[in-house]
Image: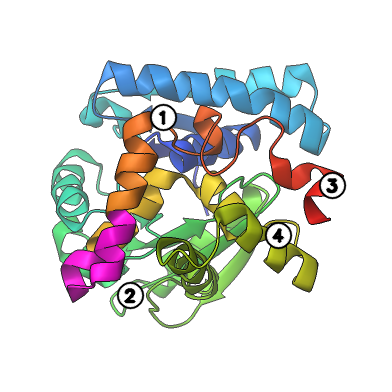
Amino acid sequence: MNYKNITVAGSGVLGSQIAFQTAFHGFNVSVYDINDEALEKAKDRVINLKPRYQEDLGASQEDVDAAFDRMSFYSDLGKAVEDADLVIEAVPEVVKIKTEFYEKLGSAAPEKTIFATNSSTLLPSQFAKATGRPEKFLALHFANEIWTNNTAEVMGHPGTDKNVFEDLLKFAKAIGMVALPLYKEQPGYILNSLLVPFLEAGQMLLVKDVSDAHTIDKTWMIATGAPKGPFAILDIVGITTAYNISSAKAEATGSEEFAKLAAMLKTEFIDKGKLGRETGEGFYTYPNPAYEDPDFLK
């Protein structure tokens, strides 16, 4: 594995985390997004990660400052990838957006560059042709808050070169992840094959008015000893992601329940700027959410 220069395309919640985690472990990182406004938000996200790394990992101020210094930010895709060994794509979970991005990336990136998608619900084989280099394309999927929830699922498609697959496992370990190989394409990988149905079950209880979000979380936490319930997890994942998934399911299946869920997430949360933990409010308010209060489970 000769990776030195990594480009992260898409600087949302997880894209920013991937970029900082990679820089923290000594790689040069270019962050790409569609405009300077998005990049300014990305810089703010990264700066806000510094104290989390100090608190959760015992990193020094020098460590986190050095990581930030290894990062550069571009709204020009050609410049962002001009010497990239690996591009990790973290653009929105919309097939059209990803397909168009890969078509542009395939033209802009050097021949040596490996492409990895961080998609959590879509398969590499859906985009392999659009990349123009299917043998150098696969999935590298992270969990949110990756510095502590350090899973990295590596999943190829039938045309992925086995050496590329092995190199990506090594890269995942090099940035402090536990590398988890998947030997066959699976929508949702391992993590989301387990997590998405769980989160949807919680949301359906809410949208059907069976109970409120906090009571649903409380039930799960008391009964299983889990540190968080579905709605606390949704706040970390981000309400926008939950909306995109439910909206896509409503469109694909014609489900009235998913349509109702998507509408509720949009009007009650997204339209009000309540996007989850990142904005300070979602199903809970932050920095001190109710589920962390010892009295919450009484």
Indicate which disc residue 297 carries: none
Instruction: Locate residue 154, reporting x and y percent.
Output: 49, 66
Instruction: Locate residue 116, reporting x and y percent.
Output: 37, 55
User: Which residue does the numbered mark 4 point to in the structure image?
Assistant: 218
Indicate which disc residue 295 carries: 3
Q: Is the magenta region chiefly helix, strand or loop?
A: helix
Identify which amino acid the numbered label 4 is placed on. Lys
Q: Residue at x 64, y 59 (%)?
A: 215
Q: Secondary structure at mark 4?
A: helix
Q: Residue at x 79, y 37 (%)?
A: 57
User: Which residue does the numbered mark 1 point to in the structure image?
Assistant: 30
* Number of residues whose C-alpha sits closer than 10 Å to that of mark 4, classed few (under 14), some (14–19) or many (20 or more): some
* Number of residues whose C-alpha sits closer than 10 Å to that of mark 3, classed few (under 14), some (14–19) or many (20 or more): few
The question of residue 256 being in magenta is answered with: yes
Distance in Å between CA atoms under marks 1 and 3:
44 Å
Disc 1, disc 2: CB below 8 Å? no
Q: Residue at x 42, y 46 (%)?
A: 239
Q: Secondary structure at mark 2?
A: loop
> Disc 4 or 3, which lies upstream in sequence?
4
> Disc 1 or 2, which lies upstream in sequence?
1
Is residue 107 in view? yes
Depth order, front residue of 101/292:
292
Indicate which disc residue 157 carries: 2
Q: Quadrant of residue 8?
A: top left
Identify which amino acid the numbered label 2 is placed on. His
The question of residue 119 being in magenta is answered with: no
Identify which amino acid the numbered label 1 is placed on. Ser
Instruction: Locate residue 103, reporting x and y percent.
Output: 13, 49
Q: Secondary structure at mark 3?
A: helix
> Disc 1 or 3, which lies upstream in sequence?
1
Is residue 134 in view? no
